[in-house]
Image (tube, rainbow, N blue to C red):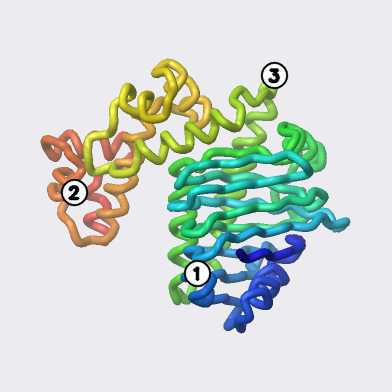
Amino acid sequence: MLYIKNDYTHLGKVIENFAAALDVTLINNTLQLPTTAGTGHMSYYELPNGLQVLVSNFILQQDLTIKRQKSETECYQLYLVENTHGSITNIEIEQDNYRHYSPNFASVALRSSFFESEIFLSKGTNVNVVNVVFGKDWLARYLNLPDSNELLRKYLSLKTAKLLFVALDLQYKQLAEELFALSSGNDAMKLLGMEHRVMQIIELFFRRIIEKLNQPETTVPLNRQDISRIINIESSLIADVFTQPPTIKQLATQHNISETKLKKDFKAVYGMPLYQYYQKARMKAAHNILLTGKYAIKQVATEMGFSNVSNFTIAFKKEYGYLPSKIAEEV
């Protein structure tokens, strides 16, 4: 098993510690995992706007425990994670423990440097993580809030673990996919493109948190077991958007939950009804396929299960505000 200690106030030191523990050399701030540990890479970036970013995309060949030590330097880590094919994800923060038994774990959250944490990932996990670190001064400057300290205090107090899990919805997933693609490529505009996506993630996260905290009474209606179950249901729902989705009854039976609670909890976590979310996932997939320029609109409509192109066009325009033919004209 791999065991690595880190201080997450500086992500450059984090990747250096990983390299030392694995006995490998960093090349252009990128770590390629040795085959004994896994396959894939970690890359560190310092963006023009002062943000530190660590992009990790690898498959583990050993169990991995990461110990994050507390620090007197105040900073915050926003992390976006979509791990697949594992069996256990365990997160412990200041005596509070969250354990997720499932092949998939997808979440976005903010952590403070004032609290210790430990993360365990089991062998076989496909790790896809974006870590972003910033100080309170950076946050106050870019968010332009009168009291960012109060916002952070209130957010971090929502759970005793000093951590609020937010489900990774389609908007986050799209931005993460684009970040992973930029990190793996050699685009001359890589840093600018990454900065743009990271800022979108930060904006999306804090807009939603501010909206939540501005509600008359901020509560966390679901416990962590409920949230884990809904994250698993979301994975089952959009596992293959090219086929008919499972019925609510099938999902409820598979995940041992009543149909009423499933619908209620799904909307609480993802902000919309279950099949509306599925439709968005379908349109996202169709949009990405059209962007390749390799397929005609009719082909995509057929692949997505639409009986005719007109129905597909209507659904696409409802989601994106323009016709799919606009993409065909531009690519």
Marks 1,3: beta carbons within 8 A: no
Q: Residue at x 30, y 41 (%)?
A: 282
Q: Secondary structure at mark 3?
A: loop
Q: Nearer the viewer, residue 90 or 142?
A: 90
Give the left or right position of residue 231, taking residue 284 as reference.
right
- Which percent across, then down, holds residue 1? 61, 64
Query: Tag on residue 216?
Result: 3
Mark 2–mark 1 Cα distance, whole angstroms, equals: 36 Å
- Lower sequence index among marks 1 and 3: 1
The extreme right residue here reads 72
Q: Which residue is mark 2?
A: 300
Q: Is residue 7 above or below residue 327?
A: below
- Which SS class for mark 1? strand
Q: Position of residue 26 (x, y in %)?
A: 61, 81
Q: Which mark is residue 62?
A: none
Q: Nearer the viewer, residue 132 or 116?
A: 116
Quarter-of-image position of residue 165: top right
